[in-house]
Amino acid sequence: MSRSEAIRSALVASARRLRRSSELAAEVAALEADDDDRDEMLAVAGLMESLRAPR
């Protein structure tokens, strides 16, 4: 692999990571803004807590 190919490969990989990071951040923001999803998350957390073995 030539030096320029290695640089290009590194740049492409970095761009992919940034895009995935941006997409994940957008998905998290959408879920945080979804009241139904938040209610379901809290209900599941409550259920999981009720099923936890006593300490």
Image (cartoon, helix red, strand yellow):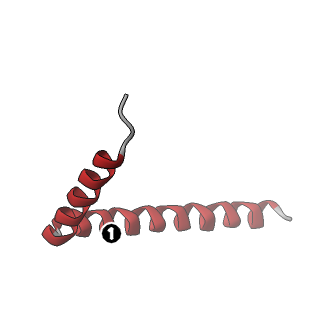
Could you say which is closer to the camera, residue 26 or residue 19? 26
Could you say which is closer to the camera, residue 46 or residue 39? 46
Residue drawn 54% across and 68% down?
16
Residue 50: x percent and y percent? 28, 47
As drawn, is 18 to the left or to the right of 54?
Answer: right
Residue 31: x percent and y percent? 25, 67
Question: Across the whole image, how many numbered discs are drawn on residues?
Answer: 1
Q: Secondary structure at mark 1?
A: helix
The residue carrying mark 1 is: 27
Residue drawn 16% across and 64% down?
39
- Placement of 5 over or under 51, stated as above or below: below
As drawn, is 41 to the left or to the right of 39?
Answer: right
Residue drawn 86% across and 65% down?
1
As drawn, is 5 to the left or to the right of 18?
Answer: right
Q: Give the farthest residue toward the top.
A: 55
Q: Tell me the quarter of the image containing the C terminus.
A: top left
Residue 28: x percent and y percent? 30, 63
Residue 42: x percent and y percent? 21, 56
Q: Give the farthest residue toward the right.
A: 1
Q: Quadrant of residue 12?
A: bottom right
- Placement of 47 over or under 33, stated as above or below: above
Q: Amino acid at mark 1?
A: Glu
Say few, some or many: other residues with alpha carbon within 10 Å of mark 1 (under 14 / 14 to 19 / 20 or more).
few
Q: Give the farthest residue toward the front.
A: 54
Q: Quadrant of residue 35?
A: bottom left
